[in-house]
Image (spheres, grey):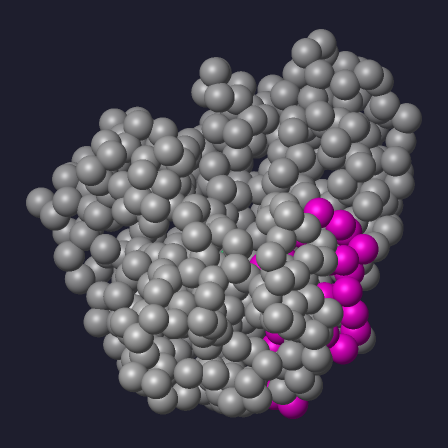
Amino acid sequence: MDSPWWRDAVVYEIYVRSFADASGDGVGDLPGVRERLPYLRSLGVDAVWLTPFYPSPMADGGYDVADYRGVDPLFGTLADFEALVHDAHELGLKVLVDVVPNHSSSEHPWFRDALRGVGRDRYLFRDRPNNWQSTFSGPAWTQSADGQWYLHLFAPEQPDFNWRNPEVHAEFLDILRFWLDRGVDGFRIDVAMGLYKAEGLPDVEDQAFASVSPIWGRPEVHAVYRDWRALLDSYPGERMAVGEVWTDDPADLALYVRPDELHQSFNFSWLQAPWSPAAFRKVIDDTLKTVPFATWVLSNHDVVRHRTRYGTDDPGTGLARARAGLLMMLALPGSVYLYQGEELGLPEVTDLPPESRQDPVFKRSKGELPGRDGCRVPLPWTPDGASYGFSADGVAPWLPQPDEFRTLNARSQADDPGSTLEFYRRALACRRELARSVPYALEWLESPQGALFFSRGSLTCAVNCGSDPVLLPPHESVLLSSGPVEDGVLPPDTAAWLRTS
Ligand code: GLC
């Protein structure tokens, strides 16, 4: 029997606000996504994940949901969503949507009721706050008009649900059903390790993300995912769920992907690893040892783009490493999550004017933390126009775009064999071809200082993270490389796929 589609799928994250704007208001939307589905098909991905497009006051870019069963007019209509799913399926693309179960918007009818004293137990109200801090900086508690305080692990506009109240549990099962009935192939679960907090909400000594603490990764959360799995399994067509689980312990991560829980969880240790063969090897070994089906991710809408992470001082080095990193990631067993714009080699935009920044992290830290706007700059599609083809002509995008988008846009890169876009297309096509013949198991080969060589059947991947060129291992042919490879020599910051017998 064929293995389920998600086990080795390449999923492309669409941060909807910044992907493509069809309505001409400067903000990306669902019709914009729909128009660009052929681009994604030709890029060669298997699925898209749409970040929240639900009605929202947009205090956190839509991760503050006021109605879990609708579409915000900023992003379109439910009919637009249905048309998008229809077209995606016609093109053979699966569609995942984001579900945000840790908190709602403060504009959600339940929270408005709670403020009036109705159904307050759906949230976490207390007479006195504890010492927890919000992930977006500042205290995690805000006082309501009648004197009680409510918990928000993120912005004050994002009150945390009380998952010990069965009504919350039932409501989310119903929300999942709503979208499953509209044909979605699965869910990305926001803050999947955060739903339950320790009874009594005790003070903490150190609030850094940890495997199990009073705040994150409570064992009670697993019963929720067992129920969600049963629901997903009751639908035809291998519907799936991937959890956003931040933890520093791979064994803890493994708990979320037990056979009766989530299908996948993001593997953030991969994007946290520095450009170092030892660090990469450790993450690969830990991952393959602990989870049944691995996932890999280098960038998303919450982290500095990996081109910039890998080479802050020298953009050329950053891009070379980003391309090599992609090839290494695509050679690993399991599934891969890409973030929009990485196929164009986009860097983090680090010089956004403070007045244009919109991330609550920037605002709440009073500008001390830059926040995440730098990886959310609207995509460039064409070399000209007020927004490089993101919006209608003459319309300014919701965040300003840098001048280098004049060359980094999709149209300028299309059909240029040296471009990052064409490199991604080739790599994804090659991976698709190899998928059937390459086994899951990975074998390490002896490699020179600074390099990593591994093989899966007849595919060998060689990556040079060091500063000196290295000799490639024995091979029949070079299938693909992230930079020039000549005479059997792999230059620094370069990766190659080799066919071996
Ligand atoms: C997740 C999202 C992030 C959001 C936060 C609160 O980490 O990826 O963008 O700000 O949850 O919902």
Q: Is residue 321 left or right of residue 477?
A: left
Per the rendered image, the range of residues in magenta is 233-261
On the image, the x and y values in percent for residue 105 come to: 35, 70
How many badges with numbers are in the image? 0
Q: Is residue 395 visible?
A: yes
Q: Is residue 367 above or below residue 287?
A: above
Q: Residue at x 65, y 90 (%)?
A: 234
Instruction: Kindly identify the residue that appears in the image at 20 percent across and 46 percent down.
Output: 397
Q: In this rendering, is residue 342 above or below 482?
A: below
Q: Please, is residue 242 above or below residue 356 in the view?
A: below
Residue 266 placement (x, y as % from top left): 63, 55
Q: Is residue 382 visible?
A: no
Coordinates of residue 7 in the picture (x, y in percent): 70, 63
Q: Residue at x 57, y 88 (%)?
A: 166
Q: Is residue 137 left or right of residue 243?
A: left
Based on the picture, tell me whether residue 256 belongs to the magenta stretch.
Answer: yes
Q: Is residue 438 left or right of residue 192?
A: right
Quarter of the rendering containing residue 28 = bottom left
395 part of magenta stretch: no
Residue 329 % position (x, y): 67, 42
Residue that extends furthest to the left in the rendered view of this protein: 394
Residue 274: image quadrant is: top right
Task: Please tell me which residue is depicted at 84% across the width and 18% down the height of the picture.
Answer: 448
Relative to 322, residue 22 above or below = below
User: Which corner quadrant of the image does residue 125 belong to?
Assistant: bottom left
Which quadrant of the rendered structure holds the C terminus? top right
Considering the image in quadrants, where does the N terminus appear?
bottom right
